[in-house]
Image: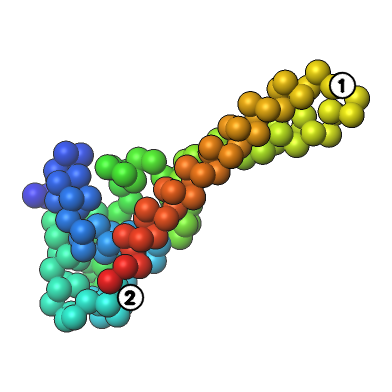
Amino acid sequence: MHGHVKESDLEREVAGEYNTFRVYLYMLRAKDGSVRQVQKALGFSSPTLARHHLEKLESLNLAKKDPYGNYHVIPRSFGILKSFIIVGSFIVPRTIFIAAMFATMTCGFLMNLPRNENLLWALIPSVVGLVVSVYQTIRYHRLLSNKLYKK
């Protein structure tokens, strides 16, 4: 399956496979790792299981094995990962930017409210947007954290 892999194949072969997806999430955060590192980090019962998932990622062009036996991740956005941005070793929900926008708006309205009481009507939807976007951001974050750390 070398070459360009279709997104639907990635969704089925990685996102649809619990442990393969966990290995990919781990690799996205770690950037690279050995079979033993993946086994230990994810609590797999044997190195063979970790190797199987790493080789599967390699066959899907999501990881590359170097001559020393270490695997290096190749970041791709597919499935649920489309809702996230990869920044260094962090996988951040895209909704965090909406939450930041609503937080900025809410602060601006609160600072100017004493001078202009009409801003109260703008403050209400801003606070509602802030609460909803923070809630969604936390839900997305937990979704990936649960996939990565549950054994």
Q: Residues within 10 Å of mark 2 (few under 14, many from 20)?
A: few
> Can I make out residue 108 in this image?
yes
Q: Is residue 51 left or right of residue 111?
A: left
Q: Are marks 1 and 2 in contact (CB under 8 Å)?
A: no
Task: Tell me, for residue 41, which label it has, or none.
Answer: 2
The percent coordinates of residue 7 (x first, y second) are: 20, 39
Q: Nearer the viewer, residue 129 or 51?
A: 129
Q: Position of residue 23 (x, y in %)?
A: 26, 64
Say what secondary structure mark 2 lies in.
helix
The answer to whether residue 10 shows anywhere in this view is no
Q: Position of residue 114 (x, y in %)?
A: 89, 29
Measure the alpha-carbon separation of dots 1 and 2: 54 Å
Is 76 on the left-hand or right-hand side of 128?
Answer: left
Helix, strand or loop at label 1? It is loop
Three-letter amino acid code of the residue under disc 2: Ala
Marker disc for residue 24 = none
For image coordinates 21% across by 59% down, the residue present is 18
Q: Is residue 131 above or below residue 21?
A: above
Q: Which residue is mark 1?
A: 116
What amino acid is at disc 1? Asn
Q: Height in image: 54 above or below 47? A: above
Above or below, comparing residue 69 to residue 133 in the picture: below
In the rendering, at what x and y percent does residue 74 appear? 30, 54
User: How many labels sit on residues?
Assistant: 2
Q: What kind of colouring is applied to the model shown?
A: rainbow
Residue for point 15% across, 73% down = 49
For this view, does 140 lie left or right of residue 16? right
The image quadrant of residue 110 is top right
Residue at x-position 49% and y-position 50%: 138
